Image: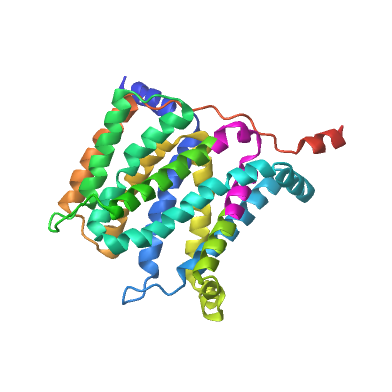
Amino acid sequence: AFPTKAMSWLSEIFPSRLTAGVFVGYMALFVNLGLLVTASKNPDGSLPYNPVTVIFMTEMVKLLASAIIFLREGNSVETLAKTFMANQKIWLLYFGPAGLYALYNLLTYVNLSHYDPTTYFLLLQLRVVVTGVIFQLLFNQTLSRMQWLSLFLLTAGCVVKQYNFESNVGIVFDRSLFLIALQVFASCFAGVYNEYLLKGKSGQVHTMIQNCYMYSAAMIVNAVILMVQGELGKAFTPEALGTLSNKWVIALILNNAAVGIVTSLFLKYLNSVLKTFASALELMFTAFFSWLFFGIPITFQTVAAIGIVSVAIYVYTLNPVRHATPQTLPTTHPETKKAAS
């Protein structure tokens, strides 16, 4: 009876093998990201590459990968170009999440200059609950008490994992706290709004074309911000570009590009609420593999956090969020079908 019941709630959370694979792949790639960053550091803890250069190259690889996947489905380059140009209004909509993600990255540096790391990461855990609120508003889908309980437990588990009990966490209601709240909102709204675009009316456009919109918009937004800051040129100096031959840099770029593609599939076929659970689980798996590969000790906090997150997952499985069914996407442009007939 237990296996049958377990399969029942698993099939409710993961409607197909594809969605289960996307969930596992999402976690695996993010865990791998943390391990790659740790492994790539110099002995003194510095990074042997320019992060801005890596970010730009990653967006370029994401864009190229999305286009290649679209072409591999039997579409022509002409179809790719026509489909991209025929839906420019949707492309403009993607400047919203692209701008919010850029704001989030910018506020990371600003807020870390105002808060110690413990307080900063503690406050960021509000993302779990805020994601639930924004999900309700955009999808007009009210979360149940059990779902909210699971989100609050998940928040508690993340707080326990990040909290340093030896430090004095000081939270003052001032401008800095407003900036933290703005960063949390930017992250949550960008993620849920991206899901809304992938599942809404724009869902009629192929997912990989929407990825092309997202990544091209992100490159433009980041380029403008860096240009205003006078930092754009530093990303393309001979020294910065020379680091791209580093094996760790190549691995980071490929891994981050895969993260982008898998995240779009996650938001398309699953939902932002389940994504918060995947993010919490990746924290736990990262702790385990960091101990396994780098000898970083697993603390009692980590064990306690795993226990709390496990309870949160169990509560969630009792009443998971129902998935919006994505529309079947055409693999060819309508004009191509007309030509073929």
Q: Is residue 88 left or right of residue 284?
A: right
Is 144 drawn above or below residue 69 in the view shown? above
User: Residue 271, how many percent across, how many down?
Assistant: 45, 35
The magenta segment is: 197-217
**Residue at the outermost bottom position:** 239
Q: Is residue 198 magenta?
A: yes
Q: Is residue 340 left or right of residue 248?
A: right
Quadrant into which the C terminus falls = top right
**Residue at the outermost front position:** 174
Residue in the picture at 46% in, 36% down: 20
Is 330 drawn above or below residue 222 in the view shown? above
Q: Is residue 247 magenta?
A: no
Residue in the picture at 62% in, 35% down: 202
User: Residue 206, how many percent across, how many down?
Assistant: 65, 39
Quadrant into which the N terminus falls = top left
* Residue 269 in view: yes
Residue in the picture at 24% in, 42% down: 157
* Residue 288 in view: no
The answer to which of 146 and 253 lies nearer the viewer is 146
**Residue at the outermost top position:** 1
Residue in the picture at 59% in, 43% down: 93
User: Residue 185, how many percent across, how many down?
Assistant: 39, 44
What secondary structure predominates along the stretch shown in magenta?
helix
Is 187 drawn above or below residue 247 in the view shown? above
Q: Is residue 211 left or right of residue 277?
A: right
